[in-house]
Image (cartoon, rainbow, N blue to C red):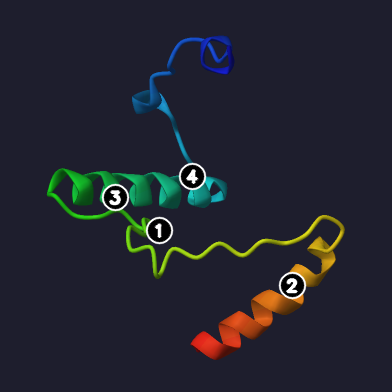
């Protein structure tokens, strides 16, 4: 339903993006780069196929407020 309710695909070739649309432009460039990478047989960003590196951190319910501290600890170990 979510797919159908969005309506027809807009013709983006007639868009006039300005300075405030920099994020949209950067995101579309990133998508184009990643699509080209996959077409050439490469791996897109943030795909982790190795089970050893594909680790999920579980945050128990009610403990999400602690996540920012955990993220800082992890990033300091990696940096």
Residue drawn at (74%, 72%), measured in percent from left and top?
Answer: 68
The label on residue 46 is 1
SS at mark 3 in the image: helix
The label on residue 24 is 4
- Judged by depth in the image, the label closer to the viewer, 3 or 4, is 3
Q: Are marks 2 and 1 in contact (CB under 8 Å)?
A: no
- State the CA–CA distance, disc 3 to disc 2: 29 Å
Q: From the viewer's perspective, is 24 left or right of 11?
A: right
Q: Earlier in the sequence, mark 3 or mark 4?
A: 4
SS at mark 1 in the image: loop
Which quadrant would residue 56 be assigned to in this image? Answer: bottom right
- Judged by depth in the image, the label closer to the viewer, 2 or 4, is 2
Q: Earlier in the sequence, mark 2 or mark 4?
A: 4
SS at mark 4 in the image: helix
- Which residue position is annotated with label 3? 34
- State the CA–CA distance, disc 1 to disc 4: 20 Å
């Amino acid at each position: 339903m979510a797919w159908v309710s969005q309506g027809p695909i807009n013709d983006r070739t007639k868009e006039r993006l300005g300075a405030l649309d920099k994020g949209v432009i950067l995101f579309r460039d990133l998508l184009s780069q990643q699509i080209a990478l996959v077409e050439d047989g490469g791996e897109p960003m943030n795909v982790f196929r190795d089970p050893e590196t594909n680790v999920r951190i579980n945050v128990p319910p009610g403990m999400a407020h602690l996540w920012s501290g955990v993220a800082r600890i992890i990033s300091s170990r990696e940096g």
